[in-house]
Image (cartoon, rainbow, N blue to C red):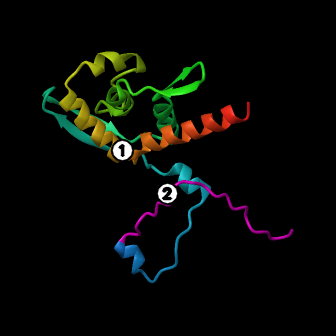
Amino acid sequence: MENREPDVVETDFEEVTTPVPEEKANAQEPKLFLTKEAILGAEDLHHEDVFVKEWNGWVQVWALSGQERDRYESSLFKEVKKGMKPDLRNLRAKLVVMCVRDQNGKRLFSNNDVEALGRKSSAALDMLYGKAQELSGLRPKDVEELQKNLESVQKEDSNSD
């Protein structure tokens, strides 16, 4: 079987590097490369207990999985006659609904609770939203980048008509 170089795909995405912990960077031991089983078996969805003073109690805020993040980002757009349009209504409540859980890790809210939660304290929502973003690796500019990519695709589609 012939060895061949993998295909290179160029993207417009910003390169993101994860810093190597100092103890690993200075180690003399060989690198440990992961297996599929190790990756799929990793407990990588972190959470933190958060006190919400406006509600006088604790909740757990969990990181989104990859699938959940895709669903969240998709919820920020709605279909219109000529494609997709940003829909940032209840942006914070949508994320909080997906990330806030009880002490057993069970979601407190269903997707049907977005409107009701959106009517709650903006200070509480903003604090939980910020923690959910942090745990999920969401950056504030991610929504802007999604919108730009969507506009670019829509422009290409309209030019090909």
Residue 4 colored in magenta in the image: yes
Tally the numbered discs: 2
Residue 150 place in picture, x, y as percent: 55, 37
Query: Which residue: 60% across, 55% down?
Result: 11
- How many residues crowd mark 2 within 10 Å: few (<14), some (14–19), many (20+)? few
Residue 69 position in % (x across, y down): 47, 38
Q: Which disc, if any, is residue 140?
A: 1
Tell me if label 2 and label 1 are in contact, CB under 8 Å. no
- Between residue 126 and residue 112, name the one nearer to us: 126
> What is the secondary structure assignment of the residue under circle 2?
loop
Residue at image point 30% right, 16% down: 116
149 to 114, vertically: above or below: below
| Position of the N terminus by quadrant | bottom right
Q: Name the residue under label 2.
A: 14
Magenta stretch: helix, strand or loop mostly: loop
Magenta-tinted stretch: 1-21
135 on left or right of 124: right
Q: Where is residue 15 in the image (x, y as percent from the top left)?
A: 50, 61
Report crowding for label 1: few under 14, some 14 to 19, many 20 or more residues within 10 A (C-alpha).
few
- Disc 1 marks a residue whose amino acid type is Pro
Q: Specify the label residue 153 is tagged with.
A: none
Q: Kindly identify the residue that appears in the image at 48 percent across and 52 percent down.
A: 42
Image quadrant in which the C terminus is located: top right
* Camera sees residue 30: yes
